[in-house]
């Protein structure tokens, strides 16, 4: 087909990194910042590397309009690391915390939290995640150390269209791994925000954490607390965390610059709406040929999940869909193995043109059946 040389990558994570960034990384790989050594080799104590770290922190503050009373921390361990990091750092003497479970990732965080404290799910969840129950029906504990949620569920395709309200100044903790920098957030509403970089802001191996100052150093678990194995978790404690030496900060830095040069978070949000609306429209106009289980007000702009051939999906047709898409250069559209079907991840680096190519393919595929 005429399009087979153009590749559009819709992987859920690790995901598309802007081509311009990849090119720059390639160009600089042998000689970083005129040091005559590679970024992979340069000392993490060098001035040049320190500049990358400082510039990265400043770009995050600038792009997200982070208030002065927040620390920006770059560390390792991914989103999963923070599933433990959050309770280890934030559980207070009540030992209690509330979790809003709306998909596979908040469910995992909830299970991890149980290892450290008396964590509570604020509503009864069903096994399939299709939306967000109204806030009026949640039961929030005023003694909770924090209220935890995942703003965009990467596997299920469920995204909040509001910021949850906490009660009695309970800090709000948010996993933004798969939609950070894709919409404008008022950071002051959060106690902690974290994101593994490998979806919207960089490559695997670096985790961004924003923490409000007053929540740092309050943890009840101490380093001497062998019972919880905290001694080995120096990389997870917000007040003593060792500055990450990861080269991935360099890629993160370049992606953040790219976001800035391309209109900032406001423009990323505009594009996310444009790209995702295009695909949801094909689904909605398809009379059930493409089927989304997600309630309209909880539809993710980042990860669009759908079935082909009806609500439960026709597996043979889905296989054909994925094969023909791949032949057209539309790659990595297979849904997560736990839910099946199709998933189109439309992160910031996925272009409007990529989305148009997918939209047109979906229409043509349907019309051919
Ligand atoms: N949270 C969300 C929303 C995710 O999509 C992922 C995906 O991998 C994770 C957490 C886990 O992050 P990591 O793989 O960095 O541990």
Image (spheres, rainbow, N blue to C red):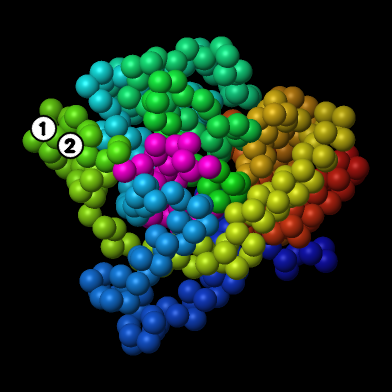
Q: Are the two marked residues, 2 and 1, in contact with CB atoms closer than 8 angstroms? A: yes
Q: Residue furthest right?
A: 367
Asked if residue 53 is positioned above or below residue 43 in the image, the reply reads above
Asked if residue 167 is positioned above or below residue 366 in the image, the reply reads above
Q: Quadrant of the N terminus?
A: bottom right
Q: Is 285 left or right of 34, judged from the image as shown? A: right
**Residue shown at 67%/33% (left/top)?**
299
Judged from the image, the secondary structure of the residue bearing numbered disc 2 is: helix
**Residue shown at 46%/50% (left/top)?**
66
**Residue shown at 51%/25% (left/top)?**
165
Residue 333: horizontal and vertical position, in percent? Answer: 65, 47
Of 144 and 111, the residue lying toward us = 144
Cα gap from disc 2 to disc 1, whole angstroms: 6 Å
Disc sitting over residue 55 in the figure? none
**Mark 2 surroundings: few (<14), some (14-19) or many (≥20) residues within 10 A:** some
Q: Is 36 left or right of 174, judged from the image as shown? A: left
Asked if residue 67 is positioned above or below residue 354 in the image, the reply reads above
Of 13 and 323, the residue lying toward us = 13
Judged from the image, the secondary structure of the residue bearing numbered disc 1 is: helix
Residue 194: horizontal and vertical position, in percent? Answer: 42, 43
Residue bearing mark 1? 226
**Residue shown at 53%/42% (left/top)?**
186
The answer to whether one can see residue 298 in this image is yes
Disc sitting over residue 230 in the figure? 2
Q: Does the magenta run of residues contain 299?
A: no
The answer to whether one can see residue 207 in this image is no
Q: Which residues are magenta?
A: 186-213
Residue 39: horizontal and vertical position, in percent? Answer: 36, 75
Residue 362: horizontal and vertical position, in percent? Answer: 81, 46
Q: Residue furthest front?
A: 68
């Amino acid at each position: 087909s005429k399009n087979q040389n153009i590749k559009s990558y819709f992987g859920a994570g690790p995901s598309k990194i802007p081509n311009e960034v990849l090119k720059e990384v390639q160009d600089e790989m042998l000689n970083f910042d005129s040091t005559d050594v590679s970024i992979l080799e340069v000392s993490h104590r060098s001035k040049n590397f320190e500049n990358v770290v400082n510039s990265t922190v400043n770009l995050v503050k600038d792009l997200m309009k982070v208030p002065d009373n927040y620390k920006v921390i770059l560390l390792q361990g991914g989103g999963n690391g923070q599933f433990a990091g959050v309770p280890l750092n934030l559980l207070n003497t009540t030992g209690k915390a509330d979790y809003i479970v709306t998909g596979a990732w908040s469910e995992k965080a909830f299970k991890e939290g149980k290892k450290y404290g008396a964590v509570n799910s604020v509503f009864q969840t069903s096994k399939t995640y299709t939306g967000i129950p109204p806030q009026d029906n949640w039961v929030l504990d005023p003694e909770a150390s924090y209220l935890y949620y995942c703003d965009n569920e990467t596997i299920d395709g469920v995204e909040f269209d509001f910021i949850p309200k906490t009660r009695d100044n309970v800090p709000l903790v948010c996993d933004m791994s798969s939609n950070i920098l894709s919409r404008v957030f008022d950071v002051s509403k959060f106690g902690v925000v974290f994101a593994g970089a490998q979806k919207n802001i960089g490559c695997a191996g670096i985790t961004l954490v924003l923490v409000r100052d007053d929540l740092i150093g309050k943890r009840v678990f101490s380093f001497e607390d062998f019972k919880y194995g905290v001694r080995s978790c120096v990389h997870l404690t917000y007040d003593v965390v060792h500055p990450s030496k990861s080269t991935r900060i360099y890629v993160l830095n370049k992606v953040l610059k790219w976001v800035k040069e391309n209109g900032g978070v406001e423009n990323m949000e505009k594009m996310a709406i444009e790209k995702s609306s295009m695909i949801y429209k094909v689904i909605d106009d398809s009379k059930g040929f493409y089927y989304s289980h997600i309630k309209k007000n909880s539809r993710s702009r980042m990860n669009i999940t759908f079935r082909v051939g009806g609500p439960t999906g026709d597996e043979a047709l889905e296989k054909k869909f994925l094969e023909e898409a791949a032949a057209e250069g539309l790659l990595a559209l297979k849904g997560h193995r736990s839910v099946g079907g199709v998933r189109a991840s439309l992160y910031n680096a996925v272009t409007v043109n990529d989305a148009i190519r997918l939209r047109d393919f979906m229409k043509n595929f349907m019309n051919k059946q």
